[in-house]
Image (tube, coloured by chain):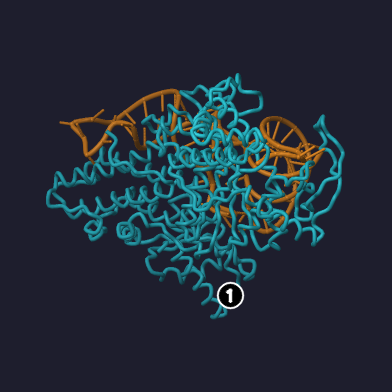
Chain colours: A cyan, B orange
RNA sequence: GCACCCGUAGCUCAGUUGGAUAGAGCGCUGGCCUCCGAAGCCAGAGGUCACAGGUUCGAAUCCUGUCGGGUGCGCCA
């Protein structure tokens, strides 16, 4: 079990018993107390602020209160010593046994180490990627894809019942453009002299095979339909082809979704009309005029009546239109219906992963969820900032027109999916990210992917060597778990073990904060501790992992090394990255 | 004009939802291989956490204002 939770329980019980003894008032709220590793390791293993948090409600001085709690904490299981410091922190020093025991737990649990149940099986929907089906994915899409995918995996590890969803934007004018572009390629495939691709159509070569495939079907039937202005078949065909393309791109990144929902289907099955009808009945929709935005002058501004959702009643800045001037629903209207649909499918918790350009859309969407679900659902939107692509320090300029557009597939082919996935998590999702195609493959300290993988590979290397040098030794996890861990007493070893024991807690905090990048940083810390320990062995032979004439000591150290590798593997598993066993 | 995000070492960025003396990489200076993988490690220098107030035991973190940067702002998705 999570070491920190264990002591949270202990502390909560102490507070309660102090209450029953009359030394503290009853009914104190324990919500705000923290049980965490202190920033400065010299302060001990676990630090708590109970005394300071409860001081005011209890009407006592923090340090006096700390004395009361500390006196009882001394007797808690695994506590070596208790100190009161600063304004009233209680610092616990835990017995080495406790950390040593974690090695056993890690080896027994394997990659499942860190699994928790704070999610309590609650259903949560994560919607990500949702790229328009008008062409292959580019690097920018990849960030949202990876962040969404890893966030989903993280939540699953934390005990949530996660559904990964893709919203297909298969409606609206860009689909018309796509369809016309496909028609163009179809005619071209039939040998018609179609000339240059007209302005406004998608020029990408990825549509050529679509045209060819169409032509290979019953081309005269299709031609006849097109002449009659009926492009439905082509439209469905090309959307299908684009979604296949996108699914292939995603699959190259190791991503697959549980549910695909079509925007078009919401138009066709009247879902949008129904939601709007309900909103209208509640007077949340009206015909009205909007002020033109100040500071920028839309040259084509035309003052007209619009069909508006009263999103300002739910915290938005202005009311939002539900219909376009041609009478069709806006994208927003469809999205309102879509999110209500998710709620009706049982998701009180929804997370959308969007690009930074959609930031201004958050308030209205949350307003809509609030309005349509009667505040029973919560929508959290995670924004992914831009990815700036570099090649050896030189920015890679991307332009669809100039043909210098870099697709996701090209990047994955060049550096591999694992590198792409890891790199996308080396920044907070809201911060812009520089991605250098050359550096990503570099084998050095400043490439975090390499650095973490190197630690894992080194650990595997030690185990290989051990078997070679000490033939009697068995290094499978269950045997290593039986080693006498009391030999692990060096400060650097303890430091590593404490870090490893922090993995379950990291899973919890990162999942609750919905910040998958914390995993990458944590793994980097583990790797640093391990590389440091390794090099201590270079300077002091007695600290090496393999001590030829001391089998029990060696077994304990190998157990620790293996546990380190397991935790890295566990973290990488959440990130969807395969740990490497050697890198020569 | 309004909204959202950001401002932390020379550079690129973390900072455990309010904790103690603010961290890491790069770069700079100086060290460590008769090797369990030096593709690594250790040490040093480097800071008014943009600025000013406020909230409290305690603020890089929360609130207000100012300055500076980014993004978005009816009928695109």
Q: Is residue A196 above or below residue A354?
A: above
Residue at x-position 58% and y-position 20%: A193
Give the residue at x 59% y 59%: A349
Where is residue A566 drawn, in percent x and y?
A: 33, 51
Q: Nearer the viewer, residue A445 or A44?
A: A445
A314 horizontally vs A456: left or right:
right
Name the side, left or right, on which B44 lies relative to B51. Answer: left
Mark 1 nearby-residue class (10 Å; few <14, some 14–19, many ≥20): many
Please state if A46 lies on the left or on the right of A459 as rendered. right
Residue on which the image places disc 1: A24
Q: In the figure, residue A301 lies in which quadrant?
A: top right
Judging depth in this view, the residue of A575 and A172 nearest the camera is: A172
Q: Name the quadrant of the C terminus of chain A.
A: top left
**Residue sitting at x 24%, y 50%:** A558
For residue A259, side relative to residue A543 (left or right): right
- Which residue occupies 43% across, 28% down? A439
Residue A410 in the image, given as x and y percentages of width and height: 45, 30
Where residue A264 sits: x, y (%)? Answer: 63, 47
Task: Give how far across and how far down residue A576 sits, in percent.
Answer: 42, 46
């Amino acid at each position: 079990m999570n070491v920190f939770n264990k002591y949270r329980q202990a502390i909560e019980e102490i507070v309660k018993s102090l209450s029953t003894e009359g030394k503290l008032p009853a009914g104190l709220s324990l919500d705000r107390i923290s049980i965490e590793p202190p920033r400065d390791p010299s302060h001990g293993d676990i630090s708590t602020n109970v005394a300071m948090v409860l001081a005011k409600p209890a009407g006592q001085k923090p340090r006096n209160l700390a004395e009361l709690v500390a006196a009882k904490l001394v007797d808690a299981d695994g506590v070596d010593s208790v100190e009161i410091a600063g304004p009233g922190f209680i610092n616990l020093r835990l017995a080495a046994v406790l950390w040593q025991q974690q090695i056993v737990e890690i080896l027994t649990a394997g990659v499942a180490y860190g699994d928790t149940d704070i999610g309590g099986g609650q259903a949560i929907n994560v919607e990500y990627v949702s790229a328009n089906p008008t062409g292959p994915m580019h690097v920018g899409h990849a960030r949202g894809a990876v962040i969404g995918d890893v966030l989903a995996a993280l939540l699953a590890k934390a005990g949530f019942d996660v559904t990964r969803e893709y919203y297909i934007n298969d409606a609206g004018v860009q689909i018309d453009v796509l369809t016309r572009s496909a028609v163009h390629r179809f005619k071209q495939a039939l040998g018609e002299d179609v000339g240059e691709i007209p302005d406004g159509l998608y020029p990408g070569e990825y549509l050529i095979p679509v045209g060819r495939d169409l032509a290979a079907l019953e081309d005269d039937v299709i031609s006849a339909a097109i002449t009659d202005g009926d492009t439905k078949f082509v439209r469905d065909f090309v959307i299908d082809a684009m979604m296949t393309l996108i699914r292939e791109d995603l699959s190259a990144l190791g991503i697959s979704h549980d549910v695909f929902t079509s925007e078009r289907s919401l138009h066709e099955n009247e879902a949008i009309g129904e939601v709007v009808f309900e909103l209208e009945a509640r007077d949340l929709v009206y015909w009205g005029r909007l002020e033109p935005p100040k500071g920028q002058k839309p040259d084509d501004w035309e003052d007209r009546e619009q069909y508006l959702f009263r999103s300002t009643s739910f915290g938005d800045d202005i009311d939002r239109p539900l219909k376009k001037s041609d009478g069709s629903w806006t994208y927003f209207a469809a999205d309102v219906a879509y999110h209500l649909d998710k709620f009706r499918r049982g998701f009180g918790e929804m997370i959308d992963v969007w690009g930074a350009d959609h930031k201004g859309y958050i308030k209205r969407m949350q307003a809509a969820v609030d309005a349509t679900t009667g505040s029973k659902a919560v929508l959290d939107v995670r924004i992914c900032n831009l990815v700036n692509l570099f090649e050896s320090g030189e920015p890679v300029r991307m332009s669809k027109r100039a043909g210098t557009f870099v697709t996701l597939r090209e990047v994955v082919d060049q550096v591999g999916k694992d590198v792409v996935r890891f790199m996308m998590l080396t920044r907070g999702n809201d911060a812009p990210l520089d991605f250098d195609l050359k550096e990503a493959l570099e084998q050095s300290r400043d490439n975090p992917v390499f650095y973490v993988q190197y630690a894992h590979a080194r650990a595997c290397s030690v185990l290989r060597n051990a078997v070679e040098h000490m033939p009697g030794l068995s290094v499978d996890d269950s045997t290593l778990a039986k080693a006498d861990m009391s030999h692990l007493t060096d400060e650097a070893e303890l430091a590593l073990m404490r870090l490893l024991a922090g993995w379950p807690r990291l899973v919890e905090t990162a999942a609750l904060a919905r910040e998958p990048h914390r995993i990458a940083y944590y793994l980097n810390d583990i790797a640093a501790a391990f590389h440091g320990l390794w090099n201590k062995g270079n300077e002091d032979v007695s600290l090496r992992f393999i001590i030829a004439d001391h089998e029990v000591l060696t077994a304990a150290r190998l157990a620790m090394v293996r546990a380190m590798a397991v935790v890295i593997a566990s973290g990488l598993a959440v990130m969807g990255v395969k740990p490497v066993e050697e890198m020569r």
